[in-house]
Amino acid sequence: MSTIGYENWAVDLAEVGAVYPFQGWEIPMTIAGVIFWLAWHRIQFVREGEHLEKARKMGDPDKIAKHLERY
Amino acid sequence: MDGNLNALTTVFTEFYYWVTVVFMFLIHVGFCMYEVGASRRRNHMHTLMKNVMVIPLVTVTFFFFGWWIYWAFPMFPFFGGLDHDMASANLPWSENMGTNLSDRITGVFWAAFLLFSWTAASIVSGSVIERIRSSALWVHAVLIGSVWWIIDAAWGWHYGGWMVQYLGYHDAYASGVIHAIAGGYALGVIMVLGPRIGKFAANGTPRDIPPHNPWMLTIGIFLIYTGFWGFYAACNVPAISPEVIDGQITGTTWTATNIYLAPTSLSGITFNFLMSLSGGLMAAYVVSKGDAFWTFSGGLAGIITASAGNDLYHPIQAMLIGAVGVVVVYKLHYWVERRFKLDDAVGAVAVHGYSGVLGLIIAGFVLWGAPSSPYEGYATINPVGQTIGAVIMFFVLGWLPGWAVAKMQAAAGVLRIPEEVELQGLDYAEHHAYEDAKTDIIEADKAHLASRATPAE
């Protein structure tokens, strides 16, 4: 048994195509990948919104002035 | 791979595109350095992170759908349906989109296009620094990098694209398909986003917001120049026979070609790359009176202005076209800034957008009547086709989607960071703990040093 479909390389390479594991599962893998991507945006979007809301009340005027001076 | 010559050509082409990708990575490194150098200290990490995360987001989406769009859309939707025959091998679940010993090209070819996608997204990223929300920019990055630019590539940067066939559109090194569209997109976004606090005085006079570190800008733009070599090489097919092209070329002489499979040479584009860079630098130095920012950017603008026709120009033509482009771009940047109160933080709209548009139109005149393709029945290169192409790139596929999506984000309140955060700085907001910890430890060290110091006699 081999996840890539070959257990040794005693083959004519002209006859060999895909060699990645779990061939036949490309569509489920794509769906998993798209979910991962969209979930990332969602998590980041929510976190950034919450963070900016907190951050707007966070500033100490003296420290902000110091930051502005640093350019 | 049957036959040694075929095998060697395939392996050479595989390696060739792989090397271009490595070179083009430097464009992104350069953009990151440039943006961080241009931003103020209180926004460094946010600015850097914003551009770094463009890499994975555009990469995965270009895998999921961007690459498929390129092969499916050459005639879609105006002159035909989706080209499923060509596109099916480039779907994310295709066996060609993975380690496959019977296909050694798709991955490196995909990556060469992908690095163009990063560039398009990164151009937009630079113009919006210090006030856009990361989440908003990353949506724009996916749209420009994996949707809009690759649609324009299918239409106008593909041997079978309808703009090439019917308009005679010619854009060998992407004046329009990368630079004009990205500049137009950036313009659409900054029109909605608004200027940084303090950019304009109460009477509307623009203020310069100088870079905090001119050296980072310098190194950044030199890295972009370096990466641009890879960009140029990636726009070519390195070696192909007339038999494989299967067009009007007769004989058996192999050649390098542009993306349209029309003949050119690495020698020719090397002349023209350097001469247009030089023309741009020289003109920018004069017109800006030696301003470092504009001189360096002018080199880039010179290349971009000449890029549409740099596969065929004479080097002196490339130099003069680069020089003319920079003068127009420089004047136009300041006119637009004053007239419309727009804050393009790194001059991206001008250097990429205006240069790209101008480059397309100039190529229409200088290359008027030249074949746009090796295939029979295609329109020849002409000023009308190039001008229409420029409008499609800058306004239709660039400005319009950028403006529309930014409008939606603004209406939802998720485009711009709050004013308080903009003033205190994004890094202060996100890394205040670091700053406080640093202050604490410095104070503690000073106190310890003072306690150990021997009083003077």
Image (cartoon, rainbow, N blue to C red):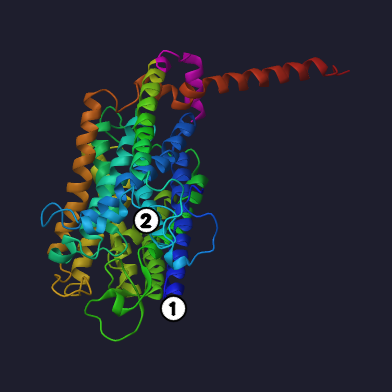
Tell me the quarter of the image containing the C terminus of chain B: top right
**Residue A69 lies in the magenta stretch:** yes
Along the viewing direction, whichever of B448 and B163 lies nearer the viewer = B163
Q: Quadrant of residue B415?
A: top left
Q: Quadrant of residue A10?
A: bottom right
Question: Up-down: is B106 above or below B126?
Answer: below
Which stretch did the figure color magenta?
Answer: A54-71
Residue that mark 1 sits on: B5
**What residue is rendered at 48% in x and 31% in y?**
A71
Residue that mark 2 sits on: B96
Q: Secondary structure at mark 1?
A: helix
Instruction: Inspect the image, locate mark 2, and give the three-letter code of the amino acid beneath it.
Output: Asn
Residue A36 on image: x %, y %: 39, 33
**Do we see residue B9 in this rendering?**
yes
Crowd class of label 2 (few under 14; some 14 to 19; many from 20; radius 10 Å): many
Q: Are marks 1 and 2 on the same chain?
A: yes
Q: CA distance from mark 1 to mark 2?
A: 22 Å
Along the viewing direction, whichever of B373 and B348 lies nearer the viewer = B373
Left or right of B31: which side holds B151? left
Crowd class of label 1 (few under 14; some 14 to 19; many from 20; radius 10 Å): few
Tell me the quarter of the image containing the N terminus of chain B: bottom left
Upstream in sequence: badge 1 or badge 2:
1
Q: Secondary structure at mark 2?
A: loop
Left or right of B233: which side holds B183? left
Question: Up-down: is A8 above or below B377?
Answer: above
Instruction: Inspect the image, locate mark 1, and give the three-letter code of the amino acid beneath it.
Output: Leu
